[in-house]
Image: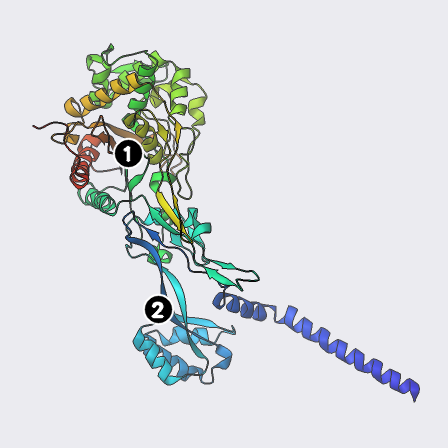
Amino acid sequence: MKNWRLNFILLLFLILGAAVIGRLVLIQVLKDDYYKALAQGQQKLFKTLKGERGSIFFKDGTILATNIKVKKTYVSPIEIENKEETAENLSMILSLEKSEIIEKINKENMFEEIKTGLTDFEVEELNKLKIPGVYITEESVRRYPQQFMASQVVGFLGGEGIGQYGVEGYYDDILQGKEILGKETMGVLAKGADIFLTLDYNIQYMAEKALEGAKKELNIEGGTIIVVEPDSGRILAMANYPNFDPNNYSEVTEFQAFQNSAVQKLYEPGSVFKVITMAGALDKDKINPQTSYVDTGQVKITEKYTITNYNRRAYGQQTMTEVLEKSINTGAVFAERQLGNEFFLDYVKRFGFFESTGIDLQGEVFSSNEELKKGYEINFATASFGQGIEVTPVQIIKAFCAIANGGRLINPHIVEKIINNGEIEEIKAEAERSSVISSKALSQLTAMMISAVENGFSKKAKVPGYYIAGKTGTSQISWSSLKVNKEGYSDKTWQSFIGFGPAYSAKFLILIKLDNPEANTAEYSAVPIFRELSKSIIDYLQIPPDYIE
C-alpha cells in the first residue's frame, strides 16, 4: 500500500509536468506567431505613458507643430460575437469598406485599430449601438497646421513616436514628454520643451511663394531659398521645392522630398565662388580691384585641359572688378594663380567649406572635397570659379555672412529659444572666427560686389535707393550628381544668386538656388527673384534707403 501511494504521487507529478511542458511547447513553438501578434497588438495600443510632446513655433508664435486630441476606435476580434453584422454596422457609421473591416476582425490579434480621427457623429453612433468588442479611446496626435510650409525645416513625428528630419529629429530628446518617477512625484507626466524658431512667418511665406513662381515660370526641377541675418546667423527663411505635408508624410512616395536641400544636398556653386577666390587674393595683397590681365577667352592648364569663358567669349584687358561684373572664368583662374594653390586651399578652409556648419537641423552633410586637396592644377583652376567643388547652400550662406558682417564666421542657426518647464533658454550663435579676412579686403570685395550689381550681369538685382552687393552663379550639373554612371557634365544647370543689403550695413542676406530652370543663366532666373524678394523684405523690415533717387 505504501509503495502504491508513492507510485501514484510520482505518476501525478509526471502527468502535471507533461501538461506544463506540453503547454510551453504549444505557446512557444506551435503558436509562437499567434502569441507574438497578441503581444505586438498590446504594445501598439498601450504605449508607455509620456507627457505631451512640446510644440514648435515660428518666431512670432505662429504654430508649426502641435498636438491635438482625437478619438479612435478599435476592435477586440475574440470578443466579437457576430463578425458579419459588426462589420456591416462599422462600415455604415465610419464610411469604410466592409471588406477592410472584415479582414481586421478575422485576424487573431488581441486588438485591431479601425479608424483614427472620429467625428462627434461617429462617436455618438458607436456609443448608441454598444457593439461587443468595439471600443473608443482618445489619443494625442501630432498636427502641422501650416501643412507644406517649412516642412523640411520642421520634419515630422514618425509612427514610433520618434522625430524624423529637421527640428523634430534634431531636438527629439527635449521635445519628447517624459514620465518623472520618484517617491514624491508618483509618476508625474512632464511636458516636453516648446521650441521657437528664428523663422519669420512673413519672410518664409515670401520665399515659398517665390519658389512656387519659379516652378510656374521657369519649370524648375527643385530649388532652395535661404534668408539670414548676417550679424546673428539667424535663419529668417529656409524654403525648398518640392516640399511635402508632414500631416500625411506616409503618403510621400519619393523619400528625397523629406530631405532639406539647404543642408542635405551637395551642389557645385558656380561663379558665386569667384567671390571666395577674390577674397583670398585681396586679403594676401596679391591683387586689388584694379589689377588687370588680358583675357584671350581661354587658359590652357595642361595639354589635356583648357578653361574657357561662358559662350567662349574673349573680353581683352579686364580688371578684377570687371571679372566679377562679367563673371569671367579666366579672370578667376588668374586671381587664383596670383594667390597660389596652397593659400587658395587655406582660404577655402577658412570660410568653412571643408566642414559642417553646425546648424541645428538633423542630417547636415558636407564634402571634404578630397579631389581638390590632391593638388592637381586643373582642380584648383575649376574650383576658382565654382566647378568641381561640392558645397551645400547653408555653407555658402555661412561664408557670405562673414563677408557681409565684417569678417566674423558665425554658425547659422534655426532655433531662437527653448522653453522647458518654465525656464527660457535663448539661443545665440558664437562666432568661430572674428577675422576671416582683413577689413581692407572686405571693403574692397564689397565694393566689387556692388559694382557687379550696378554695372554687371547682376543689374536685375538692383533695388532703387539701396546698394546691394551680389554675385550670380551658373554651374553645369555633373552626371554623377544626377546618379548617372557617366563621367563629365550634363547640359543641366544649377543657377543661383547670392546678395546682401544694404551692402555696408547688411540687414539680410539671400541665397536663391534653382535646379535646372528653363533659362540660359542665373542672370535671367535667380537674379529677378532676388530683386523681388529683397524689395519685399526691405518694405517689410522698413529698412531706410542708402540714397534718394
Label 1, residues with CA under 10 Å away: few <14, some 14-19, many ≥20: many
Determine the residue located farthest toward the front in the rendered image: 184
Q: Is residue 67 above or below residue 226?
A: below
Mark 1 or mark 2, which is nearer the start of the sequence? 2
- Quarter that holds the C terminus: top left
Q: Nearer the viewer, residue 341 or 166?
A: 166
Q: Name the secondary structure under disc 2.
A: loop
Q: Nearer the viewer, residue 363 or 144?
A: 144
Circle 2 sits on which residue? 117
Q: Amino acid at mark 2?
A: Gly
Name the residue rendered at 19%, 15% in the picture. 315
Can you give x and y, in whole percent of width and height, for residue 369 in the image? Answer: 42, 28
| CB within 8 Å, label 2 to label 1 | no
Q: Quadrant of residue 115?
A: bottom left
Q: Is residue 192 left or right of residue 62?
A: right
Name the residue rendered at 50%, 68% in the picture. 46
Can you give x and y, in whole percent of width and height, for residue 362 in the image? Answer: 42, 44
Q: Is residue 536 left or right of residue 114?
A: left
Determine the residue located farthest toward the right in the rendered image: 2
Q: Is residue 503 above or below residue 130?
A: above
- Quarter that holds the N terminus: bottom right
Circle 1 sits on which residue? 494
Determine the residue located farthest toward the left in the rendered image: 549
Q: Nearer the viewer, residue 224 or 521?
A: 224
Name the residue rendered at 61%, 68% in the picture. 32
Label 2, residues with CA under 10 Å away: few <14, some 14-19, many ≥20: some
Q: Is residue 259 visible?
A: no
Q: Is residue 80 left or right of residue 55?
A: right
Can you give x and y, in whole percent of width and height, for residue 507 in the image? Answer: 24, 33
Q: Amino acid at mark 1?
A: Trp
Determine the residue located farthest toward the bottom in the rendered image: 1
